[in-house]
Image (spheres, rainbow, N blue to C red):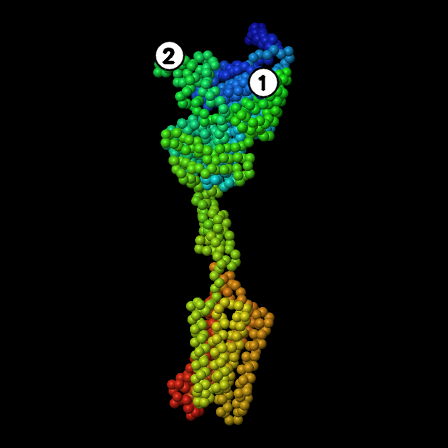
Amino acid sequence: MTFTQRWPEQGWALLQLLLVASFSQAEENECRRRGDPETPQLVKKGDIMLGGLFSFHTNWKERQDTYKKNPQPLQCMSLNFREFQLAQALRFAIEEINNRTDLLPDVSLGYIIYDTCGSIARSVRVALALVNGNEALASPSKVCPRPAQVQAIMGETSSSPSSAIASAVGPLHIPLVNQPLSTCACLSDKTKYPSFLRTIPSDYYQSRALAHLVKHFGWTWIGAVRSNEDYGNNGMATFIETAQQLGICLEYSVSFFRTDPVDKLQHIIDIIRTSTSKVIVTFLSHMDLDVLLHLLSNQNLSGYQWVGTEAWIFDSQTAAGDKNRILDGAIGLSIPKAQVSGLREFMMDVQPFNSSNDGLFTEFWEALFSCTFKLSQSEETQRECTGHEVLTGVENGFTDMSLMPIFNNVYKGVYAVAHALHDILRCNNTCNTSVTLNPSTILQNIQDIYFTTKQGDEVYFNKNGDPAAKYEIINWQPRVNGHVQFVTVGLYDASLPADKQMNLYNKTLIWTQNSQQVPVSVCSEKCPPGTLKVLQKGKPVCCYDCIRCAEGAISNVTDSVTCLSCPLESWSNERRDACVTKEAEFLSYEGIMGSLLTAASLFGACLTAAVAFIFFRYRKTPLVRANNSELSFLLLFSLTLCFLCSLTFIGRPSEWSCMLRHTAFGITFVLCISCVLGKTMVVLMAFKATLPGTNITKMFGPTQQRLSVLGFTFIQLIICILWLTVSPPFPSKNFKEFKDKIILECSLGSAVGFWSVLGYIGLLATLCFVFAFLARKLPDNFNEAKFITFSMLIFCAVWITFIPAYVSSPGKYSVAVEIFAILASSFGLLICIFIPKCYIVLLRPERNTKKNMMGRGTPKAF
């Protein structure tokens, strides 16, 4: 195609461009709002205008945009009586202020109220319409300077729309006041939302209060359900953070929005059904809860304890919709009860103020009275509206005044703006209407106001634009007539000290399924004293096993995470919940073993005394005289001391008994062995003396015998004195042998001293045994050396076996072993040396003659 063929086409395009440019130039000096204008639902003219945003409808019809033409306006559906009530509260406050002469005299307030239809996008759109207006405005320049259409905006009622609106109008410094249910803690951030103020407390306090409420009733294993928007997400985040600090665990935490697919909602229902927790904490708007409640009722999923927020806990419409009593016994926090005098009458006296065939009021009027203004053939079942109906006797969501605390928040918000305007206009009897109103000035004055309403409520805002946080604790208590009564059972005041913030009244609470017993919702039962918590692998800290404390350790509190070791002198009781003083164990006279050993010791001493008496009685007989009566009596005396010294080992060890028992034992046994050694030497010397030319008897006469016994004993005495001087035995407590007992024993002090005493005794016993063994075959009729040999054999065998038995015996048994060794060796000496002689003296006197003593017999094979 040539250029000449295309020029008409290019010319036409150029002509279109010129027309557009000229049209734009023509409109250059006019400010015009882009897009379709927004029509408010409720309007009243006034000197100063306030804006209102309410969701008169909760949903809208779905539409398919083709992107070939401008989208059509939303077709709103599902009337919301609650929002209509809130709008009426705003109208009431404005009417009341206009009728007052002490507040804004000769200045009237008006309002422009839009329906946001439950849409965040529409909320922002109509908020900007409130600021900008819809009309065209001529301007000589490209800039459009103009005052805002309204001086403050009241609404939206929930957190997510409020967040969006506050972000949009915040840079313009338009006060956004009184969001009656916008409780998200995120809205307290003045850097993001500088113009946002509210008359309802922040969820920061409500979330923490809910966590403490859950902890108060001992619920440590819970589920959590929240709305998937700013209110639910932020509120639940703060709750979870506080709950974890209080030791509360979440089995699950799920979120949804009322427009989510049914499959997602069913998944949440399945999670609740399969859970083991019995308490469900919710951060749900009443609209989201209604959707969830419908599904729960259809599947008859009851038996859970619900914990709610102010969004639904005192909502009679929610209670009326709970047909299957799923929420009975619910507990939660609500705004403190309030009454606005005249508001109920104002609402009940509602009258048509629009055409009976047009607008929002027509739709509400028909819903209120179940009538239509114009009957059609398909509507013959309904009566026709006259516009003069009265609400007396009508029961529906609009006539329910249970939300008066929320209405009071709207009321206080309007009055906050009015008081700020009153200060700016310097009103007294009249107001200075020449003052130019600036939204920034209004915002600053609202932040600084402080006044008291006619109901006595103090109204002020902190630095974050929030009021004081006070909540009532509400319990749903079903009544016989099927209705639910919202009973106030406590109060939470965040302004008080931490330990006094929650105050529960002494009232009977009703729990789920009409029970008066507090539900139990724990992953693991509390660990009783005597046990410790051991976490289950891969599970939250609330899931644990209770393990009994080990021996010697206790836990005296419930849910202890550690067991404390008992002091050294204490031990754990059977329940492992207290330390008791360890039993002090020692060889006592009262015990069976101590009694038997005491009896054996005394028997041995008495037997020795009896033998001594026999020897003394028959001391002039040849047998006694032939056996060196002086050494025999000294030996019997030493044996008596040996038997009696064993008594020093019995009883509670003391400083003196510890020193006495070992030294007495060592000295008496050396004395005993010295006597036996002397007797053995006498026998040998007597035999040697019969050989011609020997003079041995003079070398080992009575004097030498006494000196030898004294010398051997003196050496042992020196060893004992050195032992007692350097490191004597002392009483001690042995904690090593038994964990649950204290062994009271005598520590040796110097082990060298103890083994020196035993070693010296063993040396003398060995010498005695050797000499006796050498003299065993002497050719006499009564060979005493043979009996001494047997006695020394027993003595050495006893003390050789004593050493390993003593070392390996625990506690008092080591003392018993030592006593047994003393008694056994003593009885061995007594029986082997003296009993055969007593047998001859008493029972065979015919052998107790000098002739028989002097005779020579055939040596024995032994």
> Real-space Cα distance between discs 1 and 2?
49 Å
Q: Front-most of 559 and 111?
A: 111
Q: Which mark is residue 376?
A: 2
Question: Does dot 2 land on a helix, a strand or a loop?
Answer: loop
In the displayed structure image, the side of residue 449 where residue 248 appears, left or right: left
- Three-letter code for the amino acid on which mark 1 is drawn: Pro
Residue at 57% over, 19% down: 101
Q: Front-most of 601 and 38?
A: 601
Q: Which mark is residue 662?
A: none
Residue at 43% over, 73% down: 599
Q: Is residue 554 above or below residue 304?
A: below
- Three-letter code for the amino acid on which mark 2 is drawn: Ser
Residue 112: percent from the left, percent from the top?
Answer: 53, 17
Question: Can residue 232 be seen by looking at this rendering?
Answer: no
Residue holding disc 1: 105
Question: Alpha-carbon neighbours of circle 1 within 10 Å: few (<14), some, or many (≥20)?
Answer: some
Residue 347: percent from the left, percent from the top?
Answer: 46, 20
Question: Does dot 1 land on a helix, a strand or a loop?
Answer: loop
Q: Front-most of 151 and 271?
A: 151
Q: Is residue 692 above or below residue 259?
A: below
